Image (tube, helix red, strand yellow):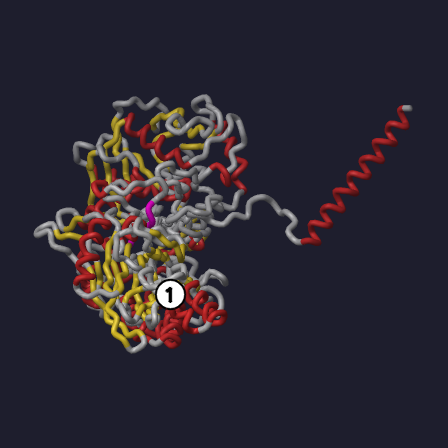
Amino acid sequence: MRLRTLASSTLALTLIVTGPAAASAAVLGDGASTGDAQAAASGELTLLATTDVHGHVLNWDYFANKPFPDGEELGMSRASTLIKGVREEKGSDSVLLVDNGDTIQGNPLAYYYAKQERITDTGETHPLAKTFNHLDYDAQVVGNHEFNYGLDLLAKYKEQVDFPVLGGNVIDDDDNDPHLDPYTMVKKQVDGQEITVGVLGVTTPGSRIWDKNNLSGKVHFDDPVETAQKYVPEMKKAGADVVVVLSHSGKDPKGQTWDPEKLQENVSTSVAKVPGVDVLVAGHTHQNEPSEVVTREDGSKVLITQPNYWARSVSEVDLPINLDTGQVDWGTAEPGATPLATQGDVAEDPEIKDLVASQHEKTIDYVNTKIGSVTETLSAKTSYYEDTAILDFISNVQTETVESALAGTEYEDLPVISQASPFSRTAEFPAGDITIRDVAGLYVFDNTLGGVEINGAQLRDYLEYSARYFNQTEEGAEFDPETGTNAVDEASGAPIPDYNYDALAGVDYDINVSKPVGERIENLTDAEGKDIGDDDRFVLAINNYRQSGGGDYPVGDLKEVYNEQVEVRQALIDWVEDREVVDPKDFSDENWRVVTSSQDPGDDDAGDDADAGDDADGGDSAAGSDTADGSDSADDGNGAEADADGAQAGADADGTDDAEGGTASASGSEDAGAGSDSGTDGSSTGDDGSGDSDGGGDLPRTGAEIATAIGLAVGAIAIGAALLIFARRRRI
């Protein structure tokens, strides 16, 4: 049974205590007087919102090849049941249904119809378009991940849906006109009276960085706040009684001052402060934040609601409408939203399942395709704090790809090194057969591979920046990954998601976490063991998210020497198919380590400082990461892709992290951050931030266990005391 909003509860209580007349007066706006001869009639408009769905139509984990676990269910098929229930209860004419972006990317189902059987080539309707059309959405805004597969695929999706896809701050380069509709006007019925709802869409400007290869020279981004300042008055003038803003952007980070010149990633709080906005739907950061009330300088209030990502919840906002004015009038009630969770006793809508059944089965067949075998189990469980073979596998493929492409060029003699991030703590290549889903579970983002020239000084700066991920420890102390990772980023005030930590292959180095940030990289040598000088030159194999500034790494001055738009995940799959056998002996190289004191160069045994964490379960102690997802948020900067999604975004996310986050989620992810995302989202997730931890040993949890433990302790103390007395008597 769903909880009602605070507004509804206040109204009901007023009816019981003081009668209908007082209740009617309670919902009047500030301009109404309790002494008015006749109180205004009121009605209710219901807003339902989703965000950061990331392709999750069904409650199915394609990486695990099974439904999501009990208590972690998700997906639009479950959200559909909740949406239909509200419409049946309230009347569909009085329900506005919107989506806040990051819809067509983020899991294998979405990937398959963007890459394997691309809808622009086949003309087949995208599974998310089918789903959203069936639910009769009123509007949607583009998220940053809507641009991942190019403007042509976005245009095809936009053509396939039966509702407007908005993006008021996405601007065409050629004529400076909006690339997408800035807003739409939707007619609804409230108590038989027509109400016009203006729905404005804005999205994070970070896409100009994260998807530069798809967008440069085609579209650019205006500031979301300035966009809202422009269009909200225009919507009101055009007859909007109610104004809803879909903002694919996180809330303003603590300490951030809005600056339109900076095109900041997360500015939803500042957008909400624009006069005339009644409700803002936030997203991108893969945070589950159903209600936040923002009070403007004039005393007026606006509600921000952010539903849970991956269709883990639907936000329900019941807006009290003054039928005399047609406008939202909270009266004395505090604005609020009800999160309708898709976990637990919520059935999957069979109509949605039938709609995408064939596409779902085709995706399952694809991800379970055998592509080779692996000689021993490779796990990413500890990749966020120690060198692992499975991360070396990524870097090995990236290095070989770039080296091959540079043959015969002026850069062929430069050593190629590689970066890789721990997108997922639960990814694993099990000994034996390896499938596409095994690789996809390891590399959850749709990144492409690039190559940049980097010198020794820049390389050290890069590594020092990455090492911010670790919390400072006492010199010589035992390193604990549970408390030693996901340090808080001073700029954002959020934990750094896993997907924004980079491990480099091709050079050797120690990370001395007893040192302050900026002084941690020690014993930096090349593959031959030679100290790296400031002017030594390398080529860094790097994914497009990182190369374009995702995670704010110092890459702006690095010259691009390779970019053939090779998708990293596909390169990994192709490598396995070509070689048929994955043997870590062919690529594993323990070239970096976390230490808590300075070590002599080449002291391979000194890395035992970090060994205490080897048995950790890989959980992320920083529960708030986005994205990401200990990851996915996010966003991803990309934000949140698969909650790494988000991960990466918010990271990105997307972590944010999408950072989601993020990203990751990835998400942060993101959750992708961003939540846990069952470890498949880079925090798993951005666009995007944490995996649950079982660390801490088998401690007693129940009352009986605690009582037994205390009894045993008391008994032990008593026996010890008796022995001590006996010993003293013997001495006497």
Residue occupied by mark 1: 34
- Name the one closer to the observer, 328 or 87: 328
Number of marks in the rendered image: 1
Q: Secondary structure at mark 1?
A: loop
Position of 149 relative to 732 (above/below) = below
Q: Quadrant of residue 278?
A: bottom left
Position of 680 relative to 94 (above/below) = above
Residue 250 magenta-drawn?
yes
Please tell me which residue is depicted at 43% across the width and 52% down the height of the picture.
Answer: 675
Overall secondary structure of the magenta stretch?
loop
Q: In the rendered structure, which amino acid carries the disc numbered 1?
A: Thr
Q: Quadrant of residue 125?
A: bottom left
Please tell me which residue is depicted at 73% across the width and 46% down the height of the picture.
Answer: 710
Is any part of residue 630 visible from this angle?
Answer: no
Residue 348 drawn at (x, y percent): 41, 71
Which portion, as a residue range, is magenta? Answer: 248-252
Residue 47 drawn at (x, y percent): 33, 66
Residue 448 drawn at (x, y percent): 26, 47
Residue 405 drawn at (x, y percent): 21, 40
